[in-house]
Image (spheres, grey):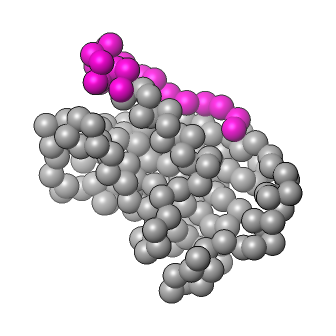
Amino acid sequence: MGNERGAIVDMDHANDLAEGDYRPRPIRHLSTQTVHGWHLKTYGINAMPQRSDDVLDPDVEAAAARVGHGLLEGLETSNTGRYGFLIIHQGGLANWLLVNRWAEDILLRSELFRAGHDAPTDFQPETSDLIGCLWELEVVDFERRAWTEAVIKGNGGVDRYMATVLNADV
């Protein structure tokens, strides 16, 4: 697989994973906030060992938040309201930003951005057909289950949904 930025997958790294060199990554809820009328949860994931309590490099986190918040500014909403979640992932292949928002009660819209390690804060739209990696999809699955339980099934509504967050090593 590839795009105009070159190969998406570093085959040496992919082979390591195929041989079982799997290490859990911390997935941490970073914040819950309202931005441009959107109620957002933000998660951080990091493939690299950290020397501090910060999950993400502060510059990467700030740059990703600017891109994600900028995307949401001025977007129209559906009957669902303005609810969603951001995933910022300092991965082995690149830094990633996933901007996810609920639409029409049962649909999830998603935008994927990528910043190479040579320019770790320069998030650009990903033009390939990627939707996320297994760690990012762990967050998507958690959020889907939380949305279904709280909002769709009516067990607490959006307040409960926004209060339900994931913190795990996966």
Answer yes or no: is residue 54 visible. no
15, above or below 147, in the image: below
- Residue 162 included in the magenta stretch of the image: yes
In the picture, the quarter occupied by the C terminus is: top right
Front residue of this view, candidates 125 and 148: 148
**For residue 117, above or below residue 37:** below
The image quadrant that residue 61 belongs to is: bottom right
Magenta-colored span: 148-170
Q: In this view of the protein, which residue sits in the foreground, 152 or 31?
A: 152
The quarter of the picture where residue 78 lies is: top left
- For residue 155, what is the image quadrant? top left
Task: Report if residue 92 is visible in the image.
Answer: yes
Residue at 50% in and 64% down:
130
**Is 81 on the left or on the right of 27, as rendered?**
left
Asked if the magenta segment contains residue 32, the reply would be no
x and y percent of residue 113 in the render?
46, 65
The residue lying at 61 percent from left, 30 percent from top is: 167
Give how far across and how far down residue 102 sits, in percent: 29, 41
**With 163 as the anchor, is 158 left or right in this view?**
left
Residue at the spot 67% in from the left edge and 67% down from the top edge: 93
Observer-nearest residue: 108 or 59? Answer: 108
